[in-house]
Image (cartoon, rainbow, N blue to C red):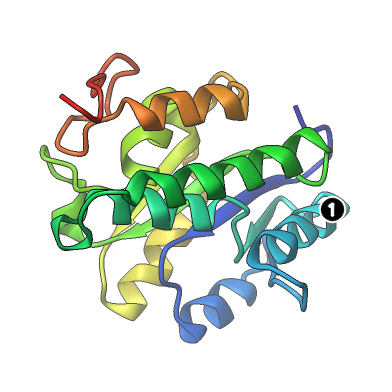
């Protein structure tokens, strides 16, 4: 568990430059962008390390060390991809797990997911953040479900101000175990939801 004065939040999803600029102008929010690195994972890990040293009520990090894992988990459920999609997910999960075990990054306090309104209904799509990640710690994953730029900025700032306390993340091993057994159509509102094998 992190111990620093700021609340560190990873922004997951397609964030426009206009959104990042608007949020970065907020007095209570410091924005951390990824720098140059050999990989997306390393860039995100570096951004999280920098975020941990900032004294601000909220630090919004526009990079996620689990982004490649999330992308492969979503791709694994695409019918057009055919069999074998799970191999790419396992490779990315192993890379992230190795970096996490080597203390190259810690999970943020919260994930704030930019999502389409259709993605947040009763039937969740194949989305790593709204599915397995949210199912293990519902209070640690907030969602802004709008596409209109001004409303999206207002939604992000509103969500930052209303984040709920909850248990800290389980181990990354446990999160990935949940992802392996989470069926995309399941509700993610309860920790017990979505437990079905990928082969079922």
Q: Give the residue at mark 1.
A: 55
Q: Please tell me which residue is depicted at 54% across the width and 26% down the height of the picture.
A: 165
Say if 2 sits above or below 58 in the image.
Answer: above
Expressed as whole percent of the image width and height from the top left, the position of residue 97 reads 66, 38
Q: Secondary structure at mark 1?
A: loop
* Residue drawn at (49%, 42%) of the image: 90
Residue 164 point in image, percent of width and height = 49, 31
Q: Please tell me how crowded label 1 is: few (under 14), some (14-19), or many (20+) other residues with Cα within 10 Å.
A: some
15, 89: nearer the viewer: 89
Question: Which residue does the image show at 15% across and 24% down from the upper left?
Answer: 200
Place of residue 47 in the rendered image (x, y in percent of width and height, measured from the top left): 75, 62
- What is the x, y in percent for residue 128? 37, 45
Judged from this view, the residue extending furthest toward the top is 192
Is residue 164 in view from this perspective?
A: no
How many labels were placed on the picture? 1
Image point (41%, 71%), residue name: 14
Q: Tell me: 3 left or right of 20.
A: right
Q: Is residue 40 visible?
A: yes
Quarter holding residue 148: bottom left
């Amino acid at each position: 568990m992190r111990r620093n004065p700021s609340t560190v939040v990873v922004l997951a999803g397609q964030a426009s430059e206009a959104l990042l600029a608007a949020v970065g102008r907020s007095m209570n929010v410091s924005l951390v962008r990824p720098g140059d690195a050999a990989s997306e994972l390393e860039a995100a890990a570096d951004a999280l390390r920098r975020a941990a040293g900032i004294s601000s009520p909220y630090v919004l990090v526009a990079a996620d060390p689990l982004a490649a894992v999330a992308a492969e988990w979503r791709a694994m459920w695409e019918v057009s991809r055919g069999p074998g999609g799970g191999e790419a997910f396992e490779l990315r999960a192993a890379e992230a797990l190795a970096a996490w075990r080597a203390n190259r990054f810690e999970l943020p306090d919260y994930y704030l997911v930019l999502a389409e309104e259709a993605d947040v209904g009763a039937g969740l799509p194949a989305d790593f953040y709204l599915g397995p990640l949210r199912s293990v710690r519902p209070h640690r994953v907030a969602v802004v479900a709008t596409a209109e730029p001004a409303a999206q900025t207002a939604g992000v700032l509103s969500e930052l101000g209303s984040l709920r306390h909850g248990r800290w993340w389980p181990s990354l091993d446990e999160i990935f175990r949940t992802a392996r057994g989470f069926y995309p159509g399941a509700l993610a509102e309860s920790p017990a939801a979505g437990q079905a094998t990928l082969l079922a």
